[in-house]
Image (cartoon, grey):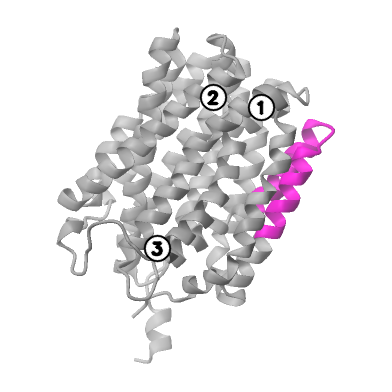
Amino acid sequence: MTAETQKTSLPIVTRERVAVSLLFLMNGFMVGAWAPKIPEFAERLQLSKSQLGLMILLLGVGSLTLMPIAGMLMARLGSRRVVRVMSVLLLPALLFLTYADSVWLAAPAMFWFGGFMGAMDVAMNTNAVAVEKTMGRAIMSSCHAFWSVGGVIGSATGGVMIAHFGTGPHAIAATLFAAILLVTAWPHTLYDPPHGAEPGAKKGIPMQLLPWLFGIMALFSMVPEGAVLDWGALYVRQELGADLALSGLAFAAFSGTMATVRFLGDLVRDRLGAVKTLRASGVFAIIGMILAGLAPDAWVAIAGFAICGLGIANMVPIAFSAAGNIPGMAPGTGMSVATFMGYSGLLAAPSLIGFTAEHTGFAPIFLFLPVLFITVLLLSPLARYADNIRKD
């Protein structure tokens, strides 16, 4: 059997791939369902932009606290056990946030939501890597596409449900839907051995510069993503006059284009290479974010977020892939730096945006974010490492 024949005979869909894709869908859905709840959450607790920024900071603190704990647990238990536990603990988070009637209850609810969302994220990404190894083909881009699809479903339906049925019924329905996804994925989640037993596993902080540069690429790609997630709905509602249902479309449009492009991500990279793909993605991201910042009305801003999502879609997967393919370095070492730095931007930076927006509004912030994309473009030659995909 030739190498080409062997490649084409590899399975495209397995139960384990479907299971991990459903986990990504569930996590993205929970995040997307939270986006249209933010304006109501702020109004219910009478929070200013800076106070809401503190709340969102707690979400980031929770995630960055539990993410390394999830990594340590996987070293002892493997990713399947950890992702199952973290998914179950994430399920009630929207209910906690919805029924918290004071800041003192909302604060730990935000920490809970961010903590188990981030811990589940680390575990499901690790499980996806294990599935890739068993299948002999890349699936990470499509897994992230399912996360984006979940974001679309959660945010697009959330605003409409909240407007017509209220926050309580929305939270209950969203939790039930997430539970159905988890129950479906549960029996087919791939078992992998404890990661501490893997040959070549290294401990400690890498001293080479390269993984940290990939961390910067991931960070500067995910900060704008977090900005749209946490502030896009509020921006189009408070500054551009959108109603509650329309404001939910801000993140939905962003996630929708991200999902579409991520389903095509592997094909695009195979044809253009990682460097050209990253550069084209950066240009789209810059154009979209500038359009959103200069938008005269909500529809133009939503279109800008959609174009920006089209650009950001493959920036993070390329950064992660490059970090996991540094010559002479165990894949997990570079990946751990890039993912931690990237998710710190996604989860923690939006709180700083909230403090700034208290004085400047959101439009100037969205006009500044393209500077981060320009930095990624300057680092784009390093994306060539993403083409060193290790396949048998």
Element under disc 3: loop
Give the percent coordinates (x, y) of residue 180.
Answer: 37, 35
In percent of the image, x 71 and y 52: which residue is there?
286
Residue denoted by label 3: 13
User: Label 1 is placed on what type of residue?
Assistant: Ala
Residue 212 or residue 298, whichever sits in front: 212
Q: CA distance from mark 2 to mark 3?
A: 41 Å
Mark with earlier residue (1, 2): 2
Tag 1–tag 2 contact (CB < 8 Å): yes
Given this view, does label 3 or label 1 mark the residue nearer the observer? 1
Residue 30 seen in render: yes
User: Magenta part of the protein: which range?
Assistant: 282-310
Residue 248 seen in render: no
User: Label 2 is placed on what type of residue?
Assistant: Gly
Viewed as shown, does residue 28 lie left or right of 265?
left
Could you say which quadrant of the image residue 113 lies in?
Answer: top left
Viewed as shown, does residue 60 lie left or right of 206?
right
Q: Which mark is residue 53?
A: 2
Could you say which quadrant of the image residue 298 lies in?
Answer: top right
In percent of the image, x 42 and y 24: which residue is there?
110
Classify 10 Å Cα crowding around label 2: few (below 14), some (14-19), many (20 and above).
many
Could you say which quadrant of the image residue 390 lies in?
Answer: bottom left
Residue denoted by label 1: 357
